[in-house]
Image (spheres, grey):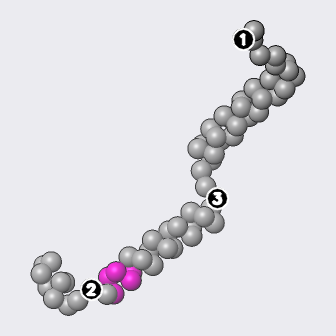
Amino acid sequence: MGTEIINLRRARKVKAKAEKDKTAQANRVVHGTPKKLRDLARVRSELSTQRLENSRLDDDIDQDK
């Protein structure tokens, strides 16, 4: 026959875990990333911008004006 026997206790645990994962994902969005990671991303961005500016040729700067 086409029906499958399921363990209700296991099904409840799977459902509860899915609910916790959903709540955890929402909390990650609300609270964002840790301050150290934000600072690290900011510093990396500033460093790459600084390297780009330092590697520009003088002729490029004159053309921008």
Q: Amino acid at mark 3?
A: Pro
Disc 2, SS = loop
Q: Mark 1 or mark 3: which comes first in sequence? A: 1
Q: Mark 3 or mark 2: which comes first in sequence? A: 3
Other residues around mark 3 within 10 Å, as few (<14) / some (14–19) / many (≥20):
few
Image coordinates of residue 60 in percent, x first then y, are 18, 84
Q: Are marks 1 and 3 in contact (CB under 8 Å)?
A: no
Residue at figure coordinates x 64%, y 58% from the top left: 34
Compared across the picture, whether 50 is left or right of 4 comes to left
Region in magenta = 50-54
Closer to us: 14 or 51 = 14
Closer to us: 55 or 1 = 1
- The quadrant of the picture occupied by the N terminus is top right
Q: In which image quadrant can residue 8 be found?
A: top right
Q: Amino acid at mark 1?
A: Gly
Marks 2 and 1, Cα distance to the nearest angstrom? 70 Å
Magenta segment, prevailing SS (helix, strand or loop):
helix
Q: Mark 2 or mark 1: which comes first in sequence? A: 1
Disc 1, SS = loop
Marks 3 and 2, Cα distance to the nearest angstrom? 34 Å
The residue at which mark 1 appears reads as 2
Compared across the picture, whether 35 is left or right of 10 comes to left
- Frontmost of labels 1 and 3 is 1
